[in-house]
């Protein structure tokens, strides 16, 4: 299957805008679940405002949140797909810049030292483009995440000791949730990376934070750990916006990687309640949009 | 717990009468301010032409569209989506905003810290929580972008909005030491040991 690069550019523009306006169904379900269980009056009122906001954004075809985020595109290229990798990246960058200028969107991206904003949501190494491969025949998918800064600002890595075991991982996650308080715009998805190298561990925490609610870690050990952490995290009482309540997090997600005999790395990255993502899937039949 | 409808600007007495858990809605003028705006105002010595005495500022950098100056859009900007950012990064600017510009209300999400709490007590001010990430709704409370200053910092310009029934916003830090964030945080930290025990962590 050959991929049309013009279609990639259009889709890269489209999925940035779609991600900012349409919350995925699993997150909407997550809101319903939290709202039904919330006992704190302030927490309940805040969840009500958040749910109303989703409706207003859809009714007015407006952005859910003002933060257009750092754009992240994750591409998965199936077997049998023919594409020029360099041209693919250029098409994604162009689509991202066009979304920013044509909608228009606030460009939230600046040079790290000069703070210069090119008003394209693009810059050195941004948008972040992750590329992976799968055995899914004749299919190419692009997932788009506009990662907001409120949740990104609170990111942590600890190179714990093997002697401290899984207890160090659990303690670190709970301490990060306490440290984050209301700053990460709870209710959050707490993403936890376990193992790997320092950079892989942080990357996995982001993958975990942006995974659909209801999905599970493919590693049974990671799946057991995320279940255990999800069951207790809301007992802390941080609540929506850090103002108290049962709804601190939708879930804790864990992703794992093999690591070195001397290492026990753990990273935490959170996704805010505006847990936005969208997807374009290319097959021989054309492009389909979803989450 | 009382509700107040304020026509901006307000007096020191109006700010001091607010207590945590009260709610407030604003009408009239609201200023939008952000990291870069305040870095330039307080670290690089730039001044604004706006008179912010008795007014409220909101931590924001909006999505706007340039449409050219018209009667309907006197600043030249139409609002697309106006929301709120995390206040924590701007903690050190609370006192100078109040001392040098007479600001009485700071609106944001996630709360501020001890230095701001002290400035609210000393000078008569409050922090109001707006629900972060609810920008589509918040945008409907804004009638117009009336003026803009320091616009070379766009989107972190100093924005002058005209608002109607902007709220309800929750008083989460008051001029009497009341602070909902520290109350919640202390209670949450008190539960840490219990939660770790439930996870089977050996202390």
Image (spheres, rainbow, N blue to C red):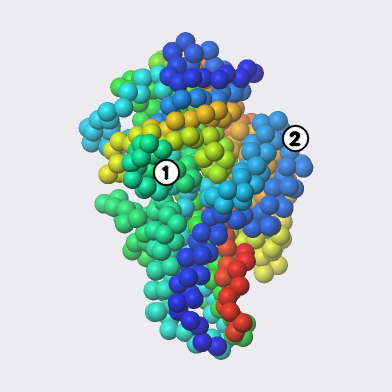
In this rendered view, identify the residue nearer to me: A35 or B91. Answer: A35
Name the residue located 29 percent from the left edge and 52 percent from the top edge: A116
Chain to which the residue tagged by mark 2 belongs: A
Q: Which residue is mark 2?
A: A39
Disc 1: CA contacts within 10 A as few (<14), some (14-19) or many (>=20): many
Of circles 1 and 2, which is in front? 1
- Say left or right for B136 vs A213: left
Q: Position of residue B125 (x, y in %)?
A: 45, 19
Q: Is residue B43 positioned above or below B98 on the image?
A: below
Q: Position of residue B136 (x, y in %)?
A: 55, 44
Q: Position of residue B131 (x, y in %)?
A: 57, 37
Q: Quick one: which residue is furthest to the front in this view?
A: B71
Q: Quick one: which residue is furthest to the right in this view?
A: A36
Q: Position of residue A158 (x, y in %)?
A: 50, 54
**Residue B138 image-quadrant placement:** top right
Q: Which residue is mark 1?
A: B78
- Say left or right for B148 vs A83: left
Disc 2: CA contacts within 10 A as few (<14), some (14-19) or many (>=20): some
In this rendered view, identify the residue nearer to me: B197 or A193. Answer: A193
Quadrant holding the C terminus of chain B: top right
Chain to which the residue tagged by mark 1 belongs: B
Q: Is residue B122 positioned above or below B88 on the image?
A: above
């Amino acid at each position: 299957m050959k991929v049309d690069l013009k279609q990639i550019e259009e889709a890269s523009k489209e999925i940035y805008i779609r991600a900012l306006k349409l919350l995925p169904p699993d997150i909407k379900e997550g809101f319903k679940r939290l709202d039904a269980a919330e006992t704190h009056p302030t927490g309940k009122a805040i969840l009500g405002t958040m749910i109303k906001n989703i409706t207003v954004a859809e009714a007015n075809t407006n952005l859910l949140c003002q933060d257009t985020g750092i754009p992240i595109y994750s591409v998965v290229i199936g077997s049998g797909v023919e594409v020029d990798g360099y041209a693919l990246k250029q098409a994604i960058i162009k689509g991202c810049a066009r979304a920013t200028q044509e909608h228009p969107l606030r460009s939230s991206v600046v040079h790290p030292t000069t703070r210069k904003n090119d008003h394209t949501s693009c810059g050195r190494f941004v948008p972040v483009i992750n590329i992976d491969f799968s055995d899914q025949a004749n299919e190419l998918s692009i997932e788009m995440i506009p990662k907001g800064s409120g949740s990104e600002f609170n990111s942590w890595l600890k190179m714990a000791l093997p002697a401290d075991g899984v207890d160090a991982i659990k303690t670190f996650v709970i301490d990060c949730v306490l440290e984050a308080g209301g700053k990460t715009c709870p209710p959050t998805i707490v993403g936890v990376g376990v193992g790997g190298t320092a950079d892989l561990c942080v990357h996995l925490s982001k993958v975990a934070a942006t995974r659909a609610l209801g999905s599970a870690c493919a590693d049974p050990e990671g799946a057991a750990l995320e279940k255990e952490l999800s069951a207790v995290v809301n007992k802390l009482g941080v609540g929506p916006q850090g103002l108290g309540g049962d709804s601190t997090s939708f879930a804790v997600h864990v992703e794992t990687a093999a690591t070195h005999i001397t290492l026990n790395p753990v990273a935490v990255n959170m996704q805010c309640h505006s847990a936005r993502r969208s997807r374009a899937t290319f097959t021989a039949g054309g492009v389909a949009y979803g989450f | 717990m009382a509700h107040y409808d304020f026509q901006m600007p307000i007096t020191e007495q109006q700010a001091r009468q607010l207590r945590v858990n009260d709610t407030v809605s604003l009408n009239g003028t609201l200023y939008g301010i952000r990291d870069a705006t305040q870095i330039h105002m307080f670290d690089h010595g730039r001044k604004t032409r706006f008179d912010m005495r008795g007014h409220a500022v909101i931590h924001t950098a909006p999505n706007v569209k340039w449409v050219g100056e018209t009667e309907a859009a006197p600043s030249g900007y139409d609002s697309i989506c106006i929301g709120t950012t995390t206040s924590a990064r701007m903690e050190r600017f609370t006192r100078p905003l109040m001392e040098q510009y007479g600001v009485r209300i700071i609106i944001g999400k996630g709360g501020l810290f001890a230095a701001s709490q002290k400035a609210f007590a000393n000078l008569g001010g409050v922090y109001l929580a707006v629900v972060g990430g609810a920008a589509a709704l918040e945008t409907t409370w804004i009638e117009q972008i009336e003026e803009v200053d320091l616009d070379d910092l766009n989107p972190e310009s100093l924005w002058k909005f005209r608002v109607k029934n902007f709220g309800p916003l929750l008083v989460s830090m008051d001029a009497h030491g009341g602070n909902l964030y520290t109350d919640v945080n202390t209670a949450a930290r008190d539960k840490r040991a219990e939660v770790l025990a439930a996870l089977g962590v050996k202390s």
